[in-house]
Amino acid sequence: MTIPRTRFAAFCAAALTLGSAVQAHPRLLTTTPGANATVTRPTKIQLNFSEKLIGPMTAAEVSMTGMGGTGDHRLMPVTGLTSAMGANGKSLTLVSSKPLMAGTYKVTWHAVSVDTHRVKGSFTFKVK
């Protein structure tokens, strides 16, 4: 039995489309504060992803890399942050009980999507 070319082409196109959806990785779409932004005394940091995430396997750490008026220094972890997944499952928010003080900060994150793909990255921002 032979398959007509048009059906075969449609089958191949569908297989490629489904294959790429299965192979997708979560991407960091936006952050607040934005990467390389300068902001005033934020109390929260939000990361928004392209796919739903597995909460217990997704996290971020914040470190101060430079104080206002001084140069860079060794990473100083920011403590006392709480984290929560967004209702849509595609965002992670870190909240501080006090505004971050002036300086440069680095956010290092890792995320695992519901299809179990793990990605990681980092970005920096400044507080004036």
Image (cartoon, rainbow, N blue to C red):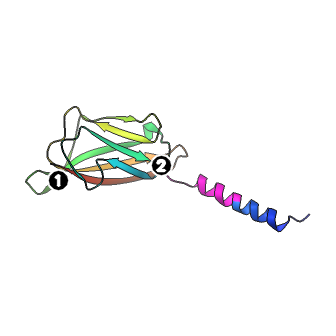
30 and 97: which one is in front? 30
> Mark 2 and 1 residues: CB-CB less than 8 Å, in contact?
no
Element assignment for label 2:
loop
Q: Name the residue under label 2.
A: 50
Judged by depth in the image, the label closer to the viewer, 2 or 1, is 2
At label 1, counting other C-alpha atoms closer than 10 Å, the crowd grade (few under 14, some 14-19, many 20 or more) is few
The image shows residue 111 at horizontal and vertical percentages of: 43, 46
> Which amino acid, by three-letter code, is at mark 2?
Ser
The image shows residue 2 at horizontal and vertical percentages of: 89, 65
At label 2, counting other C-alpha atoms closer than 10 Å, the crowd grade (few under 14, some 14-19, many 20 or more) is some
Does 118 sit above or below residue 3?
above
Horizontal side, residue 127 vs residue 2: left or right: left
Element assignment for label 1:
strand
> Which amino acid, by three-letter code, is at mark 1?
Arg
Horizontal side, residue 33 vs residue 118: left or right: left
Horizontal side, residue 13 vs residue 128: left or right: right
Residue 98: image quadrant is top left
Does 21 sit above or below residue 52?
below
The image shows residue 9 at horizontal and vertical percentages of: 76, 65
Q: Name the residue under label 1.
A: 74
- Residue at 7%, 53% (x, y): give it: 69
Instruction: Report the magenta residues as a range.
Output: 14-25
Horizontal side, residue 39 vs residue 118: left or right: left
Asked whether residue 12 is drawn in magenta, I would say no
Asked whether residue 18 is drawn in magenta, I would say yes
